Amino acid sequence: MTEKTETFELVFYGTSGWFDNTAGATSCAGITINDTDIVLFDLGTGTRKIETAAIHNKNLTLILSHLHLDHCYGLHILPLFRPASLTLIIHKDLKPYAETLFSYPFMKPRHELGFPVTLETVEDNLLAYPAFSIKTRALQHNTPVIGARLQINKTSITYCVDTRLCDAMLEITKDCDTLIIEASPLVGKKTNGYHLSLPELQKVLMATNAQKVIITHFGSLQYPDLESRKRLITTIKEYHHNVMPAYDGLVIRN
């Protein structure tokens, strides 16, 4: 008897960092799990590229790495998508700020959105749902931030952006099928101390067993166009056998 193969699509809606540029909008990626469930990683300006019908009447699970605006811009347009329900997963220390965002004057309060909203606060947790599970780890940024590993049956996808190198990051990125990780500056460029440097990104690439690595969240100043993103891949390709840059509209099928 042949084992049934899981089929789903990983779609990148926004792949730039901090602000939009000609290369793309800010961070947002999504996976349709089945006919009733969809998971989104972050909700930057790329949110506007999602077809509203793709989420309508589905159970939406939103993993917000943190609340910098290039990752949560799309919260105020959630009513356009009319999901059946929304589960928002966020670092526990950011709960009061998330509660504030879901209120006047920033957006409609929860009870006026037209769909139920559940706020799941996490740090180092494992959340189990009927069709998938999510493992989270607290990472290190200039604000509380989480990395997340989505497990769909035997397939795992890990998402880590906006963090310096730390043990928690190495742990959650080690054994996954697909790793989505933020870009580092190019050779000779420095970070502000809260993002991966090039040597740190290289270390993660060497340590992971991921079958595929997708680089996203390209800083808009250092990566103004798609050609500049390719220069980073040239710099790091010797550290992993299958690494590629993300771009808005990229679709990965398993």
Image (tube, rainbow, N blue to C red):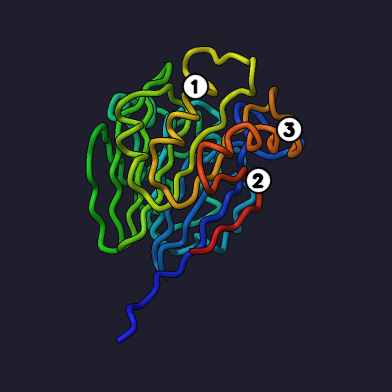
Q: For the point 63% across and 15% down, which residue is it?
A: 189
Q: For the point 66% across and 39% down, which residue is it?
A: 25
As drawn, is 217 to the left or to the right of 112?
A: right
Query: Element under label 3?
Result: helix
Binning the other alpha carbons within 10 Å of mark 2 as few (below 14), some (14 to 19) or many (20 upward) gives many
Q: What type is the residue that disc 3 sits on?
A: Ser
Which residue matches tag 1? 195
Residue 246: percent from left, percent from top = 61, 45
Q: Is residue 103 visible?
A: no
Q: Is residue 205 visible?
A: yes
Residue 231: percent from left, percent from top = 70, 33
Query: Which is more toward the observer, 143 or 76?
Result: 143
Q: What type is the residue that disc 1 sits on?
A: His
Mark 2 and mark 3: Cα distance apart in space: 12 Å
**Are dots 1 and 2 in contact, CB under 8 Å?**
no
Which residue matches tag 3? 228
Query: Which is more toward the observer, 216 or 188?
Result: 188
**Are dots 3 and 1 in contact, CB under 8 Å?**
no
**Is 10 situated above or below 4?**
above
